[in-house]
């Protein structure tokens, strides 16, 4: 499987994960606690759009992910290079966001196993985006230099 196709598949799965995580976080009252001194209200749409939640990213990176996924689908290698580099950056942002949330949230009290599962999936998905972004960009750069295979 070409790296770009694997990247699109993983990205699509992570977008579904993000939707599920957002719904769970809002319904269970799990606000973002990443470097915050005050408790946020996760039940407001504005809160989720700006800061995300304990287990889901804010809206801006998710929109960027949708756009990058579309670019990775294009046959032009230049756009795939751009998408690959974008996914590397997005992967780094997602890793920082996932690891930045506290291991033992103060305001929220999610079940340990559920919270741990969401965090593990989030970090693994972010790392997969990062690695597949590198492979996609590298493959597209090689294609630009040598022509299509």
Image (cartoon, helix red, strand yellow):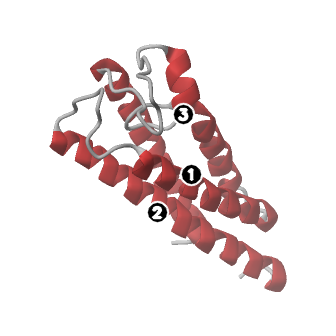
The residue located at (39%, 41%) in the rendering is: 17
Mark drawn on residue 17 = none
* Residue ranking furthest to the top: 44
Q: Quadrant of residue 112?
A: top left
Crowd rating for badge 2 (residues with CA inside 10 Å; few <14, some 14–19, many 20+) = some
Label 3: which secondary element:
loop
Mark drawn on residue 58 = 3
**Position above or below: 138 against 74:** below
Label 1: which secondary element:
helix
The residue located at (34%, 43%) in the rendering is: 102
1 vs 2, front mark? 1
Q: Quadrant of residue 34?
A: top left
- Mark 3 or 2, nearer chain start: 3
Crowd rating for badge 3 (residues with CA inside 10 Å; few <14, some 14–19, many 20+) = many
Measured as percent of width and height from the top left, residue 82 is found at: 75, 60
Residues at marks 1 and 2, CA–CA distance in whole angstroms: 10 Å
Measured as percent of width and height from the top left, residue 38 is found at: 44, 23
- Is 67 left, or right, of 111 in this rendering? right
Where is mark 1, residue-wise?
Answer: 93
Q: Quadrant of residue 114?
A: top left
Residues at marks 1 and 3, CA–CA distance in whole angstroms: 11 Å
Residues at marks 3 and 2, CA–CA distance in whole angstroms: 18 Å
Measured as percent of width and height from the top left, residue 77 is found at: 77, 67
């Amino acid at each position: 499987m070409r790296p770009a196709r694997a990247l699109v598949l993983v990205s699509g799965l992570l977008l579904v994960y993000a939707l599920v995580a957002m719904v769970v976080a809002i319904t269970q009252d799990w606000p973002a606690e990443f470097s915050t001194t005050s408790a946020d209200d996760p039940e407001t749409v504005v809160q989720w759009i700006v800061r995300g939640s304990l287990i889901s990213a804010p809206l801006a990176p998710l929109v960027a992910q949708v756009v990058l996924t579309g670019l990775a689908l294009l046959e032009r290698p230049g756009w795939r290079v751009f998408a690959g580099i974008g996914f590397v950056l997005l992967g780094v942002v997602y890793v920082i966001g996932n690891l930045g949330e506290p291991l033992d949230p103060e305001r929220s009290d999610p079940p340990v196993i559920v919270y741990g599962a969401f965090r593990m999936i989030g970090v693994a998905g972010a790392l997969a985006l990062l690695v597949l972004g590198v492979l996609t960009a590298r493959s597209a750069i090689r294609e630009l230099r040598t022509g299509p295979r």
